Image: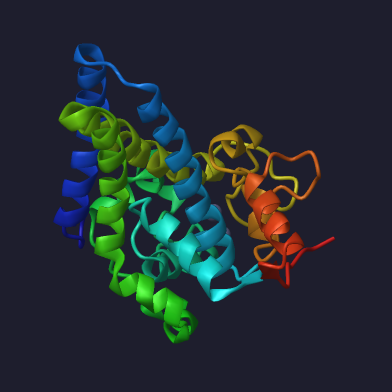
Amino acid sequence: MPGRSLNLLNVTLFAGVTGGAIIGLPAHGYFYGYSLVDWAMFVVLYIITGLGITVGYHRLLAHRSFACTRWVKGLLLIAGGWALQNSGLRWTADHIRHHARCDREEDPYNAKRGFWHSHCGWLFWSDPHKDDKFARKLQQDAVVMWQHRYYIPIVLSGLALPFVVGFLYDGWFGGLGCFLLAGVGRTFFVLNSTFCINSICHLWGAQPHGTSDSSRDSWWISLITFGEGYHNYHHRYQSDYRNGPQWYNFDPSKWLIYSLSLVGLASSLRRFS
Ligand SMILES: [Zn+2]
Ligand SMILES: [Zn+2]
């Protein structure tokens, strides 16, 4: 890409996760199989890390659509860190820029450049428009800065957890199997579900809430992204804690935020009527 250099760290991480998920994961399954514990850890960690991104990184940090106690924020940011999508601070700076400069050159995952660029291609190149100013407010937030500082140990703990559980259940091969399925495989699937918001939800789907940018509603993407497929609504009403505003919209992220508010762990839920 003219004017941009390869981001070797991201390319290496992406190749490792993708290679592990499409070669190592099925190979281990073919020769040794996966236990119920491996599958249970996959599902549990998919849910925890997926919600860490949607509720923690996206709706709490990037859009401040609700407030919560420090320790709830800390837990959400650990869960988000386990998804290998950068620290909350960096993720938020990119995401706020996406909303502020949508479909333009400065949009980090500009869908006008096509499916692959907006899905994952943007990660492979240096970004000349990268700017921390979009998340400057978060630099005053002690919990956010703590997560930013300890991002690498947090990522490693998220990969070590399935290995330890598998190891305790069935020794070294158990550890390897659980690591491949609930560590590497789960990371691959959560990454790609998040990528679908930036690609599919800017290319295909309905635009009932406005056509000023390329965002689209895609209910079926909500099924794998904990409610984030209602992306046209989200672009129109960014600080609404719901992405699917109707009661029947599949939006587990809004259900979690609402449930937290019922037990006093979240407050100041913002919504547009
Ligand atoms: Zn957003
Ligand atoms: Zn968008």
Eyeballing the image, is 248 above or below 130? above
Residue 203 pos. (x, y %): 53, 40
Residue 97 pos. (x, y %): 47, 68
Eyeballing the image, is 149 above or below 84? below
Eyeballing the image, is 37 above or below 201? above
Residue at 60 percent of width and 55 percent of height:
213
Q: Residue furthest right?
A: 273
Q: Is residue 110 left or right of residue 204?
A: left
Q: Quadrant of ligand 1?
A: bottom right
Q: Is residue 218 left or right of residue 126?
A: right
Q: How is the rendered protein coloured?
A: rainbow
Quadrant for the C terminus in the image: bottom right
Q: Residue furthest bottom?
A: 140
Residue 111 pos. (x, y %): 46, 48
Residue at 80 percent of width and 63 percent of height:
272
Residue 39 in view in this figure: yes
Residue 220 pos. (x, y %): 61, 32
Query: Who is closer to the viewer here, 155 or 236?
Result: 155
Total residue callouts: 0
Residue at 42 percent of width and 83 percent of height:
139
Query: Who is closer to the viewer here, 28 or 164?
Result: 164
